[in-house]
Amino acid sequence: MWKDVDGALIETAKPALIAHDPERAKHGIADLEAAAERLGDEEGRALGDLLTNETAQKLIAGIFGDSPFLGRLMLRYPSRVPALFNETPSDNLSRIIDSVKEAALGDNRAAFMKALREAKSEAALLVALADLAGVWPLESVTGALTDFADCCVQAGVHFLLREAVKRGQILRASDEPLEEGSGLVILGMGKYGSGELNYSSDIDLVVFYEPDQLPLKDGLDHGEFFVRVTRDLVKLLQERTEDGYVFRTDLRLRPDPGGTPVAVSLPAAESYYESRGQNWERAAFIKARPVAGDMEAGARFLKFIEPYIWRRNLDFAAIADIHSMKRQIHVVGGHEAIAVAGHNIKLGRGGIREIEFFVQTQQLIAGGREHALRGKKTVEMLDELARQQWIEPNTAEELKTAYRFLRTLEHRVQMVADEQTHTLPSNDEGIAQLAAFMGYESAGDFAADVTKTLGTVQGHYALLFETAPPLAEESGSLVFTGTDDDPDTLETLQSMGFTHASQMSEAIRAWHSGRFPATRTARSRELLTDLMPALLRALSRTASPDTAFSRFDKFMRGLPAGVQLFSMLYSNPHLLDLLAGICGTAPKLANYLSQNPRVLEAVIDPDFFKVLPGREELRESLKSQLVHAVDYQDMLDFSRVWAREYRFRLGVRVLTGSADAEEAGPAYAALAGELIEALAPAAEAKVAERHGHIPGGRFCVLGMGKLGGEEMSASSDLDLIVLYDVPKPDVESDGAKPLYASQYYARICQQLISALTAPTAEGKLYEVDMRLRPSGNAGPIATPLDAFRTYQTKEAWTWEHMALTRARPIAGPADLMADVEACIREILTMPRDRLKTAVDVADMRNRIAKEFPDRNPWEMKHVRGGLIDIEFIAQYLQLLHGAEHHEVLNTHTRTSLEAVAAARLLPTAQVDELIAGLELNHNLTQAIRVCVEGVFKPAEASRGLKTLLLRAGNAPSFEALESQLAESQARVLTAFEEIVGPAR
């Protein structure tokens, strides 16, 4: 794909970039000179000679002055820099690719990953140098990036298949051609498929497999095997190590990504595209090509779905879907007008995506009859559209120029810090730096060219698409008027995957009748009519369309009003899929949403699915809610309203798979922590109204269990301990009705429990459990810190110290919380008898097993080999080794186990099994708690919920998931018996 260049880069370079920060450039060159002195004689001389070359100096100075990322690469690998300048770029790229191929023949996965990452760093520097030196045009730059990506994906697949042969999983000789005839199809999509990768691009892959084609060992399921290969391939490419990463990898362009495993069987894929494929997927497959695995099988599959992609009749219905996608992108991108500072040059008005859509839409319309319009490359297709007189030659030239300018600008934006970003800097300094990186003397001239380019693109795009309807209609009749069923409509509904079409039609007619509050106004019924095709499509795409519709019907009947929600959905069609998914899988979320539809506004925020809210954001949000409270009751009600909304948001993140347990657990704990931190002072103030304050007195709320370990889920209760500290034991409060300290802080504790648990008009926040305090239910509800220390050091049982490993101060004065942490650390680092500790932990586990003897693997907390066993192992190791290895004393179970592995207190493989079991249990628990009350019962679960659990557990089938869960529990139980002691 890439274009060869005659001569070494140093001989052909014509760098245009300008060092925006001359001082940083000067320091960078000085650092490189120092690196030359540290190198050996030959390497040092080569680098030193290079730095005396005027052309090299200008290029290197520009890099150090404009791109911290590229500057770091040169300083990290100084010995490689001379070769990149003194040889042709094509020779260097071939050398790098050959090194990756050679590394794939090794046997050590860590060494292979290291080689991949080092090759990526050198390739990134090479491509940037050839680009910035003016040696390679855009097409050569994107082609080189694509060729390197192909090499890495192919090498990764080859390495993993060879590894599987050595494990005895594939019944072939390791020297046989493993990819050929394997049935493993890996397609490159998007810019990767078209050979147009950008500088810091992720790669879009779709993975299919032919069942029963690759000979596997007996008992090994093809689906499970290829899912594992796919996940391992992503890990090889994407995992960040000390050497960096290779490519971020996106698998979401596969059929129904929310409901299918990461590798999909070819028969299932063929059936999907024949029956359910959407127009946007047709557009995506324009750029698809086989990139690794069984290349012939990949070509056959693309040939098979050609009739789906390329329809012979003019398909103007596709335009509506394509335009709807573009409107959604504008909403997500947040750029309704052309700008420079802060503008998204990919998704914003006049951006790269508009050029791509301009081309792809016309390809979809005409490509069925004109084979020449089936190309993958944007610039080539602009020329072809002009040749065939679909567009004017001047339009093609203007869009080609704009495309090359914007893609080059995109590369410069990404070269600054190796980030997959398309957004221009939002301040003048950043714009000035980018202008210099682009070779502009003036930031004003640069801004003018950007504005002109975006305006040109927008003008051409607007002429073609701006009159398109906002939402496409589903093919077929959808008539819901009158009192009788329309036969064509029933047929349409059945073709969409609904089985109870007549009942559906009756329910929808009821919506339109205006008998419910949401559709009582004419405007709401008009909006609903316009929404209906897209709404039904969204419901049909769920794992269980009939269940989703039934719950959406209940949702509709509970809505207090409709115009605002329907308008929001009409303006943001992507929300329909989310709403359908909620109705299909999570009835608790659907019930909440029907009473609080405005919460969907938060989902429109472009950052909603990117980052979970942090403690500071939560604190400010809660503060802004409570500032309006005029009394204590208001504070309780407002806190409940706020908590419900944030729980809903977290539930959506778990439901959509955009937050796993390692993200959701801490987020739910942070939510609870902020509520406790806000309500604890309010509880104290409430008590102080009658009893005043304790002079010099302080109290602290200690989070235990899931709260302390930051492993909460949607339905977790709160395990709390309240500790206080006073100047002297007999001190009294100074109010009208004084109380002794023990009574005073007991009242505060009771008030706090009430604030958290009391069912007000807005419901309650949490159930609270105080049984982990000293002496349990027999002890005082609030405990003096000194008494707590004495009890824990002299009277406490081993299990109470186990519980302390999860103790985390949540609220209180900073100095008191520090004292409490120090006290806990002192207790956990006490000398311990190994045998006694092991016996105590094993006895405690056996007592729990007798109380909860369930063998159901879905009773993931109490079943042997479940969460309790993993947590007890971690807590036992913390008690045993905390004195010598303080790093294991972390309240978060996974972090503690990782520290155990790092300290080599257990074999790494055994810790990996425990962490894998923990991850599986937590991910499944998070999903279940969003959707189900109580224990999950597979026989009663909807297809949608089972699909959600398959995604959470990364399993190809529900049978495989149950097997995976049972095997994990068996491994954990074995580990428990080996580490702690035998189960009895």
Image (tube, grey):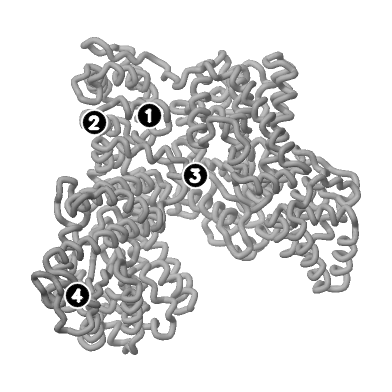
**429 up-or-down from 496: above or below:** below
Which residue is the site of mark 4?
A: 694
**Residue at mark 2 to residue at mark 4: CA–CA distance:** 49 Å
Above or below residue 241? Residue 12 is: above
Q: Considering only vertical position in the picture, is 827 above or below 719?
A: below
The residues tagged by marks 2 and 1 sit, at their Cα atoms, a distance apart of: 14 Å
Q: Earlier in the sequence, mark 3 or mark 1?
A: 3
Along the polypeptide, which appears first: circle 4 or circle 3?
3
Query: What residue is pinned by disc 2?
Result: 559
Q: Is residue 432 visible?
A: yes
In this image, 392 relative to 939: left or right? right
Residue 891's spot in the image, x, y percent?
A: 36, 70
- Residue 285 quadrant: top right
Q: Quadrant of the N terminus?
A: top right
Q: Kindly state the secondary structure of the residue where label 1 is placed.
A: helix
Q: Using residue 877 as the reference point, say whether residue 101 is left or right of it.
A: right
- Which of the two labelled residues, at mark 4 and mark 1, occupies the earlier sequence position? 1
Whether residue 87 sits left or right of residue 591 in the image: it is right
Q: Residue furthest left?
A: 737
| Quadrant in the picture for residue 765 | bottom left
| Residue under pointer 1 | 569
**Disc 4 packing (10 Å; few <14; some 14–19; many ≥20):** many
Dot 2, how many residues are within 10 Å of its Cα: few (below 14), some (14-19), or many (20+)? some
Say if residue 181 shows up in the picture.
Answer: no
Q: Amino acid at mark 3?
A: Ala
Using the numbered discs, state the Cα–Cα distance from disc 3 to disc 1 in whole angstroms: 32 Å
Amino acid at circle 2: Leu
- Kindly identify which residue carries mark 3: 263
